[in-house]
């Protein structure tokens, strides 16, 4: 019985060795791993990623963010930060570093805060958006191995490129809709140091509102009374109003000259 089984195994091994090397049922693993991207392909891949990311970031920053805020410092920060993040993730993807290190660096850049000032919520939101787009544009697959059984080589997968472009367009469209003044009225806030604290009591709310409207020159939708200094007869009041179309309120919450950044 053992001899029959041994002869059966020998016959199978012999027949396996007689198979044609070009048989479609067999895959040469060594041949698959021999496929490498050329220098021209690497340059083209980096160019596609960098150009797409730079274009989308410029649209978001220039057409939506800067149009309302007029903050040139954040304009520079967003553009450079996006390009640097894309380059970093692209290189990390090529050298096959661990996923933990990649996520760790992403988290470090994601929660970054500047020592000179607290990043406002709108600026932080745009920062997260450009980081997410840089990660998608830097890590999304563009090339794939083709002709595996004959002459394996890398070629652009235009379907993957189309999906990557679509992701960027969807983000731009979402920001455009949310930034549209037709969707929701742009309510702005202003911090006022008020000198007539006799009007801050609840029963004189309407008088306070009328006095502020006369001094500020616009209609107040709502107001909040903050810190009150009875020694100096002053109080901080936060007023809410509708911002006219085309205007910005990037410095309305600044109360000290050194906080202003041009």
Image: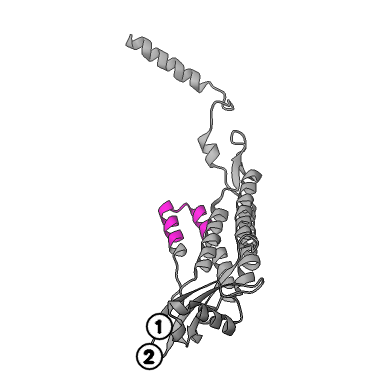
How many numbered tags mark residues here?
Answer: 2
Q: Quarter of the image holding residue 100?
A: bottom left
Crowd around label 1: few <14 · some 14–19 · many ≥20 (10 Å): some
Display colour scheme: one colour
Q: Quarter of the image holding residue 159?
A: top right
Q: Is residue 56 visible?
A: yes
Give whichever of 214, 82 is nearer the camera: 214
Q: Quadrant of the C terminus?
A: bottom right
132 vs 248: above or below: above
Q: Residue furthest left?
A: 2
Q: Over which residues does the magenta segment extend?
A: 88-107
Drawn side of residue 32 relative to residue 5, left or right: right
Q: Is residue 116 visible?
A: no
Crowd around label 2: few <14 · some 14–19 · many ≥20 (10 Å): few
Residue corresponding to mark 2: 231
Q: Quadrant of the N terminus?
A: top left
The residue drawn where x is 42% and y is 89% is 233
Task: Give residue 28's position: percent from left, percent from top.
Answer: 53, 33
Query: Magenta stretch containing residue 231, yes or no?
Result: no
Query: Magenta stretch containing residue 93, yes or no?
Result: yes
Give whichever of 9, 161 is nearer the camera: 161
Task: Give residue 121's position: percent from left, percent from top.
Answer: 50, 67
Drawn side of residue 126 relative to residue 5, left or right: right
Residue corresponding to mark 1: 228
Q: Quick one: SS at disc 2?
A: loop
The residue drawn where x is 57% and y is 48% is 141
Gap between marks 2 and 1, in whole Å? 9 Å
The residue drawn where x is 51% and y is 61% is 128
Q: Quick one: SS at disc 1?
A: strand
């Amino acid at each position: 019985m053992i001899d029959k089984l041994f002869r059966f195994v020998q016959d199978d091994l012999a027949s396996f060795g007689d198979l044609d090397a070009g048989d479609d049922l067999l895959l040469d693993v060594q041949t698959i791993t021999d496929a490498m991207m050329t220098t021209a392909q690497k340059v083209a891949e980096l160019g596609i990623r960098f150009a797409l990311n730079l274009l989308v970031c410029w649209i978001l920053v220039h057409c939506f963010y800067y149009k309302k805020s007029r903050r040139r410092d954040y304009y520079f920060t967003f553009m450079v930060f996006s390009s640097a993040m894309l380059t970093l993730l692209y290189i990390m993807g090529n050298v096959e570093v661990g996923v933990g290190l990649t996520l760790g660096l992403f988290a470090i850049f994601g929660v970054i805060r500047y020592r000179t000032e607290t990043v406002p919520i709108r600026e932080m939101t745009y920062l997260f958006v450009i980081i997410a787009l840089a990660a998608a544009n830097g890590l999304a697959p563009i090339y794939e191995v083709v002709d595996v059984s004959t002459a394996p080589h890398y070629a652009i997968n235009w379907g993957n490129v189309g999906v990557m472009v679509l992701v960027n367009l969807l983000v731009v469209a979402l920001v455009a809709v949310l930034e549209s003044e037709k969707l929701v009225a742009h309510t702005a806030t202003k911090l006022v140091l008020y000198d007539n604290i006799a009007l801050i009591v609840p029963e004189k709310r309407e008088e306070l509102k009328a006095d502020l409207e006369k001094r500020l020159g616009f209609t107040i939708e709502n107001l909040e009374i903050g810190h009150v200094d009875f020694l100096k007869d002053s109080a901080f009041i936060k007023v809410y109003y509708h911002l006219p179309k085309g205007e910005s309120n990037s410095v309305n919450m600044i109360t000290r000259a050194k906080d202003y950044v041009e």
